[in-house]
Image (cartoon, rainbow, N blue to C red):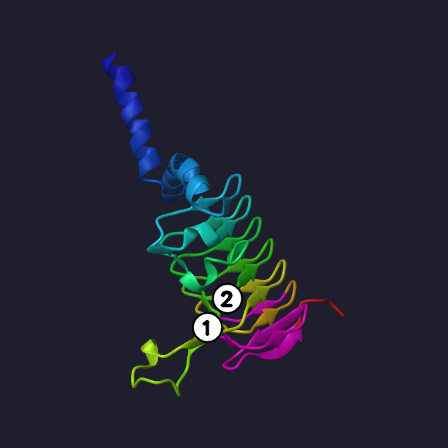
Amino acid sequence: MIDGLRRTALRANRWLGDSEASSAIRGRLLHPYRRLRFHSFGRGALLDRPIWLAGVHKIAIGDGTVLLPNCWLSTSSATWHRPGAALLIGNNVTVNPHCSFSVASSVIVEDEVSIGSYSMMVDSLHRLDGPTNSIARNPSTSVPIRVGRGTRIGERVAVLRGSTIGRECIIGTNSVVQGKVPDYSIVTGNPARIVGTTRSS
């Protein structure tokens, strides 16, 4: 009896010391709760220890999608009266730690996208010519963001309002994207510029 308890305790300690296993356990326990709160929360999806959640009833997470710790997901009250999800993250998307999504209009991340750590998507900007001296208190303008299927976004990338990134693109580390990125493009820099293609010649 005692030996059996010891073996069980050792097995549990090995699991709890493994980050992937611990995340999987937490994810399974929290999955029913997430399905109740979110606009939709897919089969096998995992949202592990987010640092901030706001307006989750307007957030849709697809099947098999994984968001690793310390991510920030926020939809503003401006989106709450509109039908459908304001932040839509598709199937089998990987979002690495410390990423942020701030949505005042619409952000759509299509299936099979990978997003590197410390990246951000922000679809709004506060006006500089507003009625107050505080930029944060001035009205904001927002334009939707869309990221195409199979795109790979490197670490510390900023995707700004009005950006449309095509399918199967690569966005280099530390890039700032604002505007249209055609399908199969490799882009890098601030502002991001096309430097190649993901299609072999």
Q: What residue is drawn where x is 55% and y is 68%?
A: 144
For residue 28, what is the image quadrant?
Answer: top left
Q: Which residues are magenta?
A: 169-196
Specify the amino acid type for callout 1.
Ser
Q: Does the residue at mark 1 contact the one at mark 2 (Cβ under 8 Å)?
A: yes
Tell me where residue 174 appears, x and y as whole percent.
Answer: 46, 74
Q: Identify the image quadrant of the C terminus.
A: bottom right
Q: Which residue is mark 2?
A: 105
Q: Along the horizontal axis of the image, is 38 left or right of 136?
A: right
Q: What residue is drawn where x is 42% and y is 52%?
A: 56
Tell me where residue 61 appears, x and y as whole percent.
Answer: 51, 49
Seen from the viewer's position, the closer of residues 192 and 196 is 192
Tell me where residue 146 appears, x and y as whole percent.
Answer: 58, 65
Seen from the viewer's position, the closer of residues 154 and 145 is 145
Seen from the viewer's position, the closer of residues 158 and 186 is 158
| Residue sticking out furthest to the left | 2
For residue 172: magenta?
yes
Pointer 1: residues within 10 angstroms few (<14), some, or many (20+)? Answer: many
Q: Identify the image quadrant of the N terminus.
A: top left
